[in-house]
Amino acid sequence: MKFVDEADIRVEAGRGGDGCVSFRREKFIPRGGPDGGDGGDGGSVRLAASEDLNTLVEFRVRRRFRAKHGRGGAGKNMTGASAADLNIAVPVGTEVRDVDTGELLGDLAEAGATLLVARGGHGGKGNTRFKSSTNRAPRQSTPGEPGEQRHLHLALKLLADVGLLGAPNAGKSTLTRALSAARPKVASYPFTTLHPHLGVVRIDTDQSFVVADIPGLIAGAADGAGLGIQFLKHLERTRLLLHLVDAGQGDSAEEIPGGAIDDFRSIESELGRYSERLVQQPRWLVVNKLDLVPPERRDRVVARLGEALDWRGPLYGISAATGDGVPELAQAAMRYLRELREHPTRTSGNAQDDEQ
């Protein structure tokens, strides 16, 4: 299935039914008086968060949604039937904005949550409503009100506990495969990940968290280079970021991998251009691909990288390809998330002092 995380749609609520002008006419009942009923209400349009969907691809095909109109009133004081509301299923994590005003209408971050986006029109009044002691034969009624119409922008932000961040080929997809049962594409060329992937990391029978793997960033991503920054919004809901750098980029294992330092700093710059809030999100540094470094030099490479980046927080050295250090990283992330759930008001800046 194609991954689509943004879509524009138009929604139109139903119009209310018109009120009826009618008079009671039965044998032996002279001057029966007005008996025109009210019109029914038009159907409203609601969005409903569903766990059965994980993409907005359906809204690339169908872009207009219309609720049904209310029925008109009838004689004998019969009220027209009100139309049923139109419920549109969207993935959990969908953010809804009004295109014309830019207003944020709602954020469907929980399964089962609903959002009223267009209210149906009220039904018109029948002539029975207008009778009085001075107006015994009213011939006026009111038409049904029109329903609301809106142009909406839907933006899906994946719900994950941990987000993977890094340059292309830093090993994010390999780490996702090592941590979970998810199987994103892995290859020896950049940009093998073209859209986000989710994986469930299970530590124990009753302990697990969700990890999100997004396409890699390069310098100039905020200006559209590479795949741009369009997928960074999927990291905004995460509670912890793992920033992967490639330890195998140096000419010699004795040296600090200069390419890893350049990648790290350029990605930090792109994050800042996208959102200062994302820069301040809890983040750990993960030095990957240590299998490309001789065993006796791995600790030194990890430490020197941390020093070169002036990184004072959680620092892990792993090899996603061989699995070395991956269980320890997963368990540390689980501990951090568990503590965060137990103490939701806890703030940690960029989490540099939380694990060390």
Image: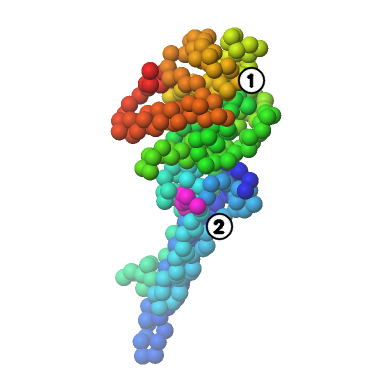
The residue at the point 36 percent across, 70 percent down is 131
Q: Looking at the image, which is closer to me, 356 or 98?
A: 356
Question: Hey, what amino acid is under mark 2?
Answer: Arg
Q: Residue at x 58, y 33 (%)?
A: 173
- Horizontal and vertical percent for residue 94? 50, 43
The way the protein has been coloured in the rendering is rainbow
Looking at the image, which is closer to me, 323 or 78? 323
Label 2 – label 1 distance at C-alpha: 44 Å
Tell which residue pokes out farthest to the right in this image: 189
Query: Mainly helix, strand or loop, the magenta region?
Result: strand
Q: Is residue 94 above or below residue 44?
A: above
Q: Can residue 47 be seen?
A: no
- Report the magenta residues as a range: 46-52
Q: Is residue 348 magenta?
A: no
Residue 73 visible in the displayed image: yes
Task: Count neighbours of disc 1 (C-alpha within 10 A) and say few if under 14, some if 14 to 19, many if 20 or more.
Answer: many
Residue at x 54% of width, y 17% of height = 295
Q: Secondary structure at mark 2?
A: strand
- Camera-near label (2 vs 1) is 1
Residue under the point 69% across and 29% down = 189
Give the residue number, with chain letter if any, for mark 1.
219
According to the picture, the residue beneath numbered tag 2 turns out to be 66
Q: Quadrant of residue 263?
A: top right
Amino acid type shown at disc 1: Ala
Q: Are marks 2 and 1 in contact (CB under 8 Å)?
A: no
